[in-house]
Each structure stands twice: as C-alpha cells, then as structure tokens.
Amino acid sequence: MPSLDVEKAYSILRLIRRAEEKIAEIYPSDKIKSPVHLSIGQESVAVGICQALRADDAASGTYRGHATYLAKGGNLNRMIAELYGKSGGITGGKGGSMHLIDMEHMVLGTSAVVGTTVPIALGYALAFQKEGKGRVVAAFFGDGATEEGVFSESLNFAALHKLPVLFVCENNGYAIHTPSTRRWAQDKLSERVETYGIPTTIIEDSDVFAIHGAAEKMIAAMRKGGGPGFLECKTYRWYEHVGPNKDYDAGYRSEKDMEKWRAADQVEKVGAMLPAVDRTRIDAEVEALVAEAIDFAETSPFPELERVFDNIYSD
C-alpha cells in the first residue's frame, strides 16, 4: 500500500482548494496584481508527487503552480503576498502568481513560458547526480508543453545520462482551449516517451494514492541510479484557463464534460475517508490558515521603489 497518510493528504488537498477558492473570490477586487491560473480540480497530482519527495528534493512547475508550491511545503502567507505584489511575497512582489521560486523549499521556479522549466529541472538533476546524495527532481508540465521541442530534447538528455528526474505531465486535455484530439495525431503520449527508454505510468482518474504510489516506486529507482521516469496524470481543470471564473459557456467544453471529474474529486473523496470529527478539525485549521494568509498579504507593505533593480544580477 502507498505510504501517504490520509489525514496528511486531505490537509494539503483542502488547503490548496480553499486557498485558490479564496483567490478566485478576491480576484475581481483588483487586489491581486497578476493573472492567476488556478489548479482547482488538479490538486491531487501535486500532492501525490510532492509527498513522495524529500525536503531536499526539488520541484519545478508551470504557471499553474500554486498547488505544486504548496504541496512542496511552501509558505501560504508569502505566496498570497506575492500575488498581491507585496514586499512580503516570495520574490518580494516581483514575480506574481506565474513566477513562484522558493529555494528554501526547493521550488526551483514556475514560468509563464510553456515548457521552459523542464530543462531547468534537468540542470538540477545533473547537479544532483554529480553531488551523489540521492536527491531527485520532479518536473511538472502540462500536455501542451509536450509539443515544445525542448520537451523531446529533455527526454533524450535525461535518458542518455540517466538523470534523477521525474517527468510529471498534468494532462488536463487542453492547451488553453484546444483539446488534445485536435492537436495530436495519436493519443499516445506515454508510448512516445517510452521510445526514449524511459519507464512510464498512466494514472487515469487523478487518484492521489495511485499517483503517490507510482511516484514512490519511480523515485526509489532514481535514487539508486536508475534514470528518469515519466508519469502521465490525467486530470481536469474546473475553472477557465486563466482567471477566477468557470467557462463552460465559452463553446469549447460543456458542464457535462465535468461530471466524471467532479465525481472523482480527490478533496471530497479523501475527506470522506476520515472520521467526521477529524475532517471538521482540519477544515477549521485550513480556514484559519487561509484567513491568516489573506491578512498577512493585505497588511504587508508594497515594495519600495528603490528595490526595483534588486536581484537582477547575482551578487
């Protein structure tokens, strides 16, 4: 059985869900100073993977990166402050939602440019390999990023050098509004990856325990020098590509498409595994954490103008 603790899994899943629901609620006020790409519906991928990592392992993510950041142990107060453009944010208010980087928690960075964090993850994996301490990197990306040339180059380089990198495709079926059925001649992503000699696993239903178990198995092999692995995690975003709203009236998908994913919602399914008293306690703790983070962001100062050129060059 996977070793992911039910209470731990629910706590993180619930924290991500409620934090992002609060972000969606606040967004129309214009207090948040950057675009937001919400992970609501996709939380289980980040939680299942990141809970299989050690604290000194690393993760790189996409512009839809709140879940990855929080699942890796990131600070919610500083994340929300970053969205507000405040000096208490992760990057002092400069990065916003799409550029979360926190080396204290080994979050290597998220990026607004599709696919660009994958080769960065490879660089860290190469460094970790040479370091010889058994550390690994999880590289998160969407199905749209697999169409970038750098994705194939990264697969080849990682396989050739047996790098300790776990490629994690959050396959929600859409590149913005275009479904994979209109982009791919064959729906055989994992089979394509296998041609590089990389072991692959497909998780069809976003089950957090299945994702965690598959990640644990691949990561254990990586720590022994077994080279990269690839997880294709089928999932579904509930909100629009970017922004705080639902978009089932936009013409490219319907509410009916959502039904099977709502039934498989991991926040609800994992929560239902807990005794009612424990779930109520966790829910209350999460609400307090989210409220504290919003208060921290709203009371933090904006950066001083003199700081605008800080961190452009390495000291």
Image (tube, helix red, strand yellow):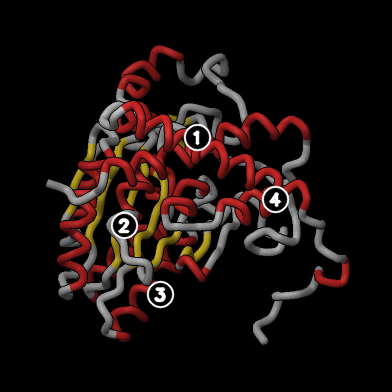
Vertical placement of 159 versus 93: above or below? below
Asked if labels 2 and 3 touch by Cβ distance under 8 angstroms, the answer is no
Which residue is at a point 23% across and 42% down the rendered structure image?
209
Q: Nearer the viewer, mark 3 or mark 1?
A: 1
First along the sequence among labels 2 and 4: 2
Can residue 259 be seen here?
yes
* Residue behind mark 3: 123
For marks 3 and 1, give the CA distance. Answer: 41 Å
Residue type, numbered disc 4: Phe
Find residue 296 and name its label. Answer: 4
For the residues labelled 1 and 2, the Cα–Cα distance comes to: 35 Å
Q: Which residue is mark 1?
A: 284
Of badges 1 and 4, nearer the viewer stands: 1
User: In the image, what residue type sits under mark 1?
Assistant: Ala
Q: Secondary structure at mark 3?
A: helix
Measure how far apart labels 4 and 3 are at the Cα level.
Answer: 35 Å
Picture coordinates of residue 267, whole percent (x, y): 37, 32
Q: Amino acid at mark 2?
A: Phe
- In the rendered picture of this protein, how many numbered marks are placed on residues? 4
The picture places residue 221, in percent across and down from the top left corner, at 15, 66
Considering every residue shown, the one lying at the far left of the view is: 1
The amino acid pointed to by label 3 is Gly
Q: Residues within 10 Å of mark 2 (few under 14, many from 20)?
A: many
- Identify the residue under disc 2: 167
Residue 166, x across and y down, in percent: 29, 60
Q: Are marks 1 and 4 in contact (CB under 8 Å)?
A: no
Crowd band around label 4 with a 10 angstrom C-alpha radius: few (<14), some (14–19), many (20+): some
Camera-side residue of 61 and 189? 61
